[in-house]
Image (spheres, coloured by chain):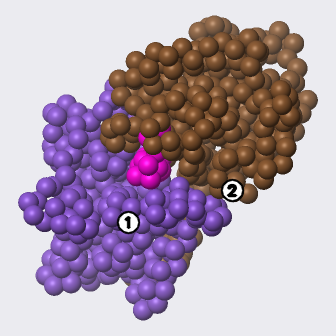
Chain colours: A brown, B purple
Amino acid sequence: MPRTRGQQTNWEKFMKLTTLLTSAAMALGLATGAIAGSDKLKVGFVYVGPVGDGGWTHEHDQGRKAIEAEFGDKVETQFVENVAEGPDAERVMTQMARSGAKLIFTTSFGYMDATINVAKKFPDVKFEHATGYKTADNVSTYSARFYEGRAIQGTIAGRMTKSNVIGYIGSFPIPEVIRGINSAYINAKKVNPDVTFKVVWVYTWFDPAKEADAAKVLIEQGADVILQHTDSTAPLAAAADAGNVIGFGQASDMSEYADGPRVSSIIDNWAPYYIERTRAVMDGTWESVSTWDGIGKGMVGIGEITDRVPADVKAEALALKDAIASGAYHPFTGPLNKQDGSVWLKDGETADDGTLAGMNFYVEGIEGSIPN
Amino acid sequence: MDLSAINPILLVASLMVAATPILLAAIGELVAEKAGVLNLGVEGMMIVGAISGFAIAVETGSPTLGFIASAIGGALLSLLFVFLTQVVLANQVASGLALTLFGLGLSALMGQSYVGVRPPQTAELNIPILSDLPVVGPILFSHDPILYLSIAIIAIVWGMLKYTRVGLILRAVGENHDAAHALGYKVVRIRIMAIMFGGACAGLGGAYISLVRVPQWTEGMTAGVGWIALALVVFASWKPWRVLLGAYLFGGVTVVQLNLQAAGVAIPVEYLAMSPYLITIIVLVILSKDKSSAPASLGRIFHASH
């Protein structure tokens, strides 16, 4: 009975098989979306979480469905969910381009380099990368000015907190997230000078258990308002459990918690942009652009403010929303100092898009340092 | 920095909660591996358990029934693995991975109408006098029953493997299935039971996430815990109490680092974030210097004709 294979070889085999199988599964998943006529425009989507996350990825998928509703038979969409940022993403994009997709939306910041790399190999495929800053002839970037919504959240948070401690769950220390923290802080401080922020980084976009843990820790340490920059509704579940804590929907309305902790939300509305860009590819008018729209253009929506918020605070928040939409107010208006005390914006000065896009510093008053 | 913001009692209590899903999944996998079966489908069985338990708890209003359903759900899914590896003798690694992929898809399907629903609350045991003790009360005597059950399972598995005839047979099957077969033990039958036990435990662990730790249903919500449980079994050298130690270390450091971050401790956050993985691995690697090794038949296919 020749059985000499040891543990070692089994593990080696396991590693090889893992790689093999995941690519096989990927190919299978793609194949289902890739069959059918050649006159249709194929549009691909790469998602960082599951479409059922109830937040970020869910809203991108709504945008995908809007494309299908708009163009019907003329388009065919496909998506791959739960794609890890890094080499995995590159492989998925390559597969999509090979299977005939002519327009590919890559919907997470961490896909930036992968998108650029794959775009180089497929010059006739158009790529749209969400929240990044690197473009190419066939790569556009698009993002929403979420920080405008954060200003409104900050205002409500500053008015509503009783403990004056606001907890903030950060995903990764990238400009988009840091911008949100600063915007919320500045505008909370404006209405409540005693407010302090506690920031926790969880290093994931989607991990409900970890997000809930982070929310619980912040609540245990005195926070009675939780702001989140992660994709699932878990922090709201933790807030609901704790009782006297409020939170906000992130990326999606998360209205299922509206009778509980969720007092408002930031809603990403990608559908108009996705439809416009798909049409541009069909018409042959697609060009590489960098789009960054906010409340004014409707890319950022503010979910209904619930009755848990006192009427005067609600009115104040809505007024702020209108002011931001019309351009009368910019959430980053001086005088503002950086965390180290150096002057960033003089009185009345507003932040330029370049600084905002690459924001890597806290404003004065926020404690703690930003991880590298 | 404000360390006084950290409440050590709440901290210990919440680290136990954070560790329990990993603990349950890992002890189930330990039993399967002790019987010589490498089931990489832990993640899939957990997520199916998470939604089975969640759905039944919501429908019946009883978390207890939910947990029972989660164990059944996990065990039922593991039957697929049983069929593939014990009946048609497919490769265990491939079958396990397939089970995970299948479980993730199946759970998403099952859970469609449960997104945004809130489950009934799992009651915490409230033992008179004991629960009211200062410090010890909240840490030791005020948890939900499943947490105690998970520790009890560790103790039972340990005792069973070490002191009972059943344990001896299970280990024999895992160490050398041909010898066990020659001695007249039903290798396949024993392995099927071990796999189903693993499935039931993984299911319980999954439901612990969806009913206690988060509590809600979200697609893919186990987010890799099953893989951590798998790794933990190896690093714990297939020893039950070390699985407990490893799970509590991992859960503990995870919660502690979040607490330290929130308290503004001046340790770079990136080190804090990787600390659960590092510390757990280092401790268990040091412990496993006694050369205890994997069951010799682990992952090998058994056929009675050999």
Going 13% across and 65% down the picture, which residue do you hit? B130
Going 64% across and 32% down the picture, which residue do you hit? A190
- Mark 2 to mark 1: distance in Å? 24 Å
- In the rendered image, the residue lying farthest to the left is B128
Going 40% across and 80% down the picture, which residue do you hit? B237
Q: Please say if A158 is above or below A223.
A: above
| SS state under label 1 | helix
Mark number for residue A78?
A: none
In the picture of the structure, the residue carrying the numbered disc 1 is: B8
In the picture of the structure, the residue carrying the numbered disc 2 is: A369
Percent position (x, y) of residue B58?
A: 23, 33
Label 2 is placed on what type of residue? Ser
Range drawn in magenta: A209-225
Dot 2 surroundings within 10 Å: few (below 14), some, or many (20 or more)? some
Camera-side residue of A335 and A128: A335
Percent position (x, y) of residue B163?
A: 16, 84
Camera-side residue of A254 and B169: A254
Dot 1 surroundings within 10 Å: few (below 14), some, or many (20 or more)? some
Left of A368 or right of it: where is B208? Answer: left
**In the image, is residue A221 part of the stretch drawn in magenta?**
yes
Pointer 1 chain: B
| SS state under label 2 | loop
Left of A96 or right of it: where is A247? Answer: left
The rendered magenta stretch, by its main secondary structure, is classed as: helix
- In the rendered image, the residue lying farthest to the right is A137
Quarter of the image containing the C terminus of chain B? bottom left
- Say whether residue B168 is visible: no
Pointer 2 chain: A
Quarter of the image containing the N terminus of chain B? bottom right
Going 8% across and 60% down the picture, which residue do you hit? B128
